[in-house]
Amino acid sequence: ARDLHDLRSAGVALCLATQAHVATEKHQAAVRTAAVAAELYREYGTPQDTARALLLGAEAALGLGRKKDAKRLASEARSLAKEAGETGLQSLASDALERVANLGPEIVEGEGKAPPVEASEAGEDDFEAPQALGVLLDQVL
């Protein structure tokens, strides 16, 4: 039980770090910490925790101008919230999807405010961080 509590605490810390990264416009770092938090919660947390981490990831992806990733993450968060019967969280996810829909076209590398993203960092790998999760679990356990 203590290990599970430590893992949830690590998830909370990762979500707080994600929020700090978004607030300071370090969106690529926010994408990574949100991904690790979501993976951690998928394995050891609740669907509600996972949905919250996914929403943070969606916000970070929007900061990078990556609408497709933001939409995918917010959609998954809404599905998890719906399955869990969390209407407030479902509403937050719907709001995130609405923000995605109301934005202009996806920012392409070299255009707009989005920083360039290396090919090795682009796409779904940002949101599935099993290697980083393994390192975190080794430290916690």
Image (cartoon, rainbow, N blue to C red):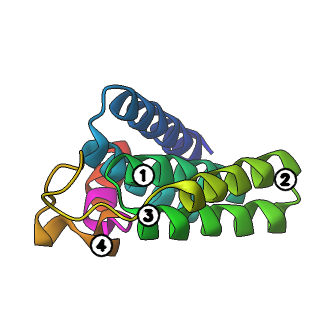
**Helix, strand or loop at mark 4:** helix
Is residue 2 visible in the rendered structure shown here? yes
Dot label at residue 67: 3
Dot label at residue 86: 2
* Residue type marked 1: Leu
66 in relation to 89, above or below: below
Report the front residue among 42 and 79. Answer: 79
* Disc nearer the start of the sequence (2/4): 2
Kindly report which numbered mark, 3 or 4, lies closer to the viewer in this rendering. 3
* Disc nearer the start of the sequence (1/2): 1
> Which residue matches tag 1?
62
> Which residue matches tag 4?
123
Pointer 1 with pointer 3, Cβ within 8 A: yes
Give the Cα separation between the discs numbered 1 and 3: 6 Å
Q: Position of residue 132 (x, y in %)?
A: 27, 57
Please provide the residue range marked out in magenta. 127-133
Query: Does 131 lie within the magenta span?
Result: yes
Residue 93 image-quadrant placement: bottom right
